[in-house]
Amino acid sequence: MPTSKIFTASLLLLGLAACSGGSDSSTGSVQGLQAPQQVTIVEAEGNSGASSLRLSPELRGVTGSDYTTDPVRFWIEDSSMKPLDTVNMILSSLQQTRYWEQTNQGAYVALVASDEEGGGGERGNSGTSYEKWTVLSTRRDNDSPQIVSFWIAQEESMGQNIPSIIYGKLTVTAEPSDSQPLGAFTLYFKNLEASASPSSTDTMFQGYLRTVARNDSQSELEFYMWHGDVDSTPGVGEYAMRDRVHVVGDPANDSGRAYTQSVFVQNSGSVYTEEGEWQLQFNADYVARRDVTNSNTLAVLDRNDYVSTVYRYGVYDATSEGRIEMSGGFPIETSNGANGWAGYYGIWFPNDVTVTDGMSVLRRSFADNSTTPYTLFVAPGRLEKRSRSAITFADIQDEVLEYFNPNTGNDLQVLWDGSDFVKVGLRNGNGGYDPIDPAVSIASSFTTGQWVSCWSQARGQVEWTWPATLSGTTEAYVWQSETITADSADMANGDLTLHGYFNQLRANITSDQANFQNSESPYLPDATDVSTGNTDYTFDKETLLLLIGSDPVTLANGVTVTQGPGMFGFNCGPLFATALTSFGDIGQSSTTYQWYTGENEWNQLRTLKDQNGDFVVFDAPIRLSYTHSEVGSSFDGRSFFLDWDGANLGGVPYEQNTDNGRWYPLFNIPTGTTMTVGQTTYKIKQLEGEQRMVEVGSPNTVYAAEGFDLDGETISEPTETPYQDPAIGAKPSVTKPPKYVGGLAQEDR
């Protein structure tokens, strides 16, 4: 499938019934109105604005606590409902701007969190990415509509590296209610290249979403989004697309009918077409779905039988049930007014902002609009101090790990199957893995005492020393890392001497070495014992570079990585502050160091210095120990270490679905689960996720029994006629810092 299919960003779609309540914030005498946070054809099971309804009595705790009141939002995932993805991305992201709280307060900026992994729990990320939204929210009086104009800065659009702006106008006439779950609203939007005039009609896509006024108790919704003409062949290098939805429902009886269609055509010399068209009818218990594109195939889905997948959790103090918040970072801006974020994971700016060492940035105070200057510190590598936690091979049995062979430059997928260590995949030239089937044993490739390092999407680095006999009780280690700067305690006595034995990176890495060409490698041969082939490194306190002698362990000047695993960067094996007396000491070393370098920002050190020249310190994530309990699950009884950074709980294993490319967690942590760290006990709550309805085994039988008649009433196909240009003009100039970051107000942060 082409990567240009609409938006590849993951969607945090929010529940319909949890969408009212604009009056919770007063802007003078005028109360802000809210539109739905999501539109959907059928509602997820138990979705409600009263989150406690999703908590069984034994899980409820302190009345009014964050744990009790934080809303729970689940959405329905089904192929027939995918045409709503783009508009739901807009609606749910718009929620992070808190526009109803800023009614008649003038234009402002919000940084909206973007997660490109589909809710992934992968470790080792470089922090959250954001989109810059400029918003103007107005309402003349309490009898007038809420009008929200917004401008979204996009670094790419339709899979192309073309900076663009989404122009949108949301008009809310009535908030959602029990009788009208959608309320009354219209949303018009269009996407233009950033350099285009705001009045241009040369769009990359455009569309509308609207409720349709009725004289009965029904609720009606239309959505239409398009680019070009899908009924003709686009020119070479061109594309055309159309998504449209029409829903007519009876909220009182939770029943209705719908039509959905999604078509995408791309001409890259050969024409690629992806399309789907569905007719649906639903009642409170079932959804009948006819796949028009696929010979009118009938399926009936059970609305009372769901497979649930949780993408986001909250972490709370188990006693007070207060939300565990952390000082993970704050917004910054350049001298030109470009907005960014500084935090524990580093520095984020949009792709069009060049980040350089010594660059001046500002943090602006909301209270008095004063500024605090900081200086960016950028180095072409990063040293991490790692503290280990122990697991066993039984904990990782059948989990696919990634293993890099520094001698050959090959990336493998490997696993412990309970009796053997095997390879199951080989990295291909497209960045993915080709399966190896049947699996091939590679246990004989390792020698007793050899250090082995693998990468897990959920656990981060998983490492061990190869034992004489590999078994389920063999101990392995996972790590929690902190970045070392000149102000770290490790550097109190000046430069740090470190000792390497495995995967030792060279200094001044050449082009052939970086690209694994001409039989060369950026790695030195592994040491054969603690005094043969080992390397002593120095971590320089002033430059924060790892050195061999006086030469930096980085790419040599002018070297570019164009192929191979170095495209993702390079990292050395464990570095020890005290020289080993034997390889057997590795198992006793609970703290090691690791050096990263490369051309990507996550391979480098990017942080802030204050006016005194001191490095800014941000809160490190809290590490939680969790043992999964689920009878029948392959993960039952296995231990995991999860990291809470104040917004995301990382460490749950994910797996990519080969059919749709999305990543799904392999288990859910139950609401009410407690985890103890030191003297503090934490409580977990499921906050966001999706539900997939299970197909019944005899669709024709259920279809007849429920009285469905998909041909009994025609649902018209929406057209582009109701579309209106948002006509909101150029993006306003806002000099104040972002008012919200990821939906959190910044006034008191």
Image: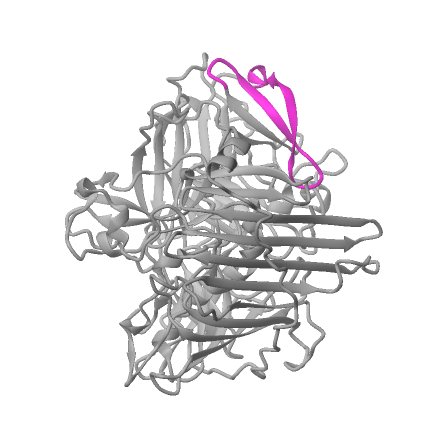
Coordinates of residue 389 in the picture (x, y in percent): 34, 33
* Relative vertical location of residue 727 with respect to residue 214 in this rendering, above or below: below
- Give left or right: position of 98 versus 414: left
Is 256 inside the magenta-drawn segment? no
Quarter residue 478 falls in: top left
Residue drawn at 66 percent across, 45 percent down: 292
Coordinates of residue 17 in the picture (x, y in percent): 36, 58
Question: Can residue 224 be seen at all in this image of the molecule?
Answer: yes
Name the foreground residue: 575 vs 652. Answer: 652
* Relative vertical location of residue 460 with respect to residue 38 in this rendering, above or below: above
* Relative vertical location of residue 309 with respect to residue 615 in this rendering, above or below: above
Stretch of the chain drawn in magenta: 417-445
* Relative vertical location of residue 475 with respect to residue 600 in this rendering, above or below: above
- Give left or right: position of 629 versus 132: left
Coordinates of residue 220 in the picture (x, y in percent): 49, 63
Quarter residue 527 falls in: top right
Q: Quadrant of the C terminus?
A: bottom left
Question: Can residue 537 be seen at all in this image of the molecule?
Answer: no
Residue drawn at 30 percent across, 36 percent down: 625
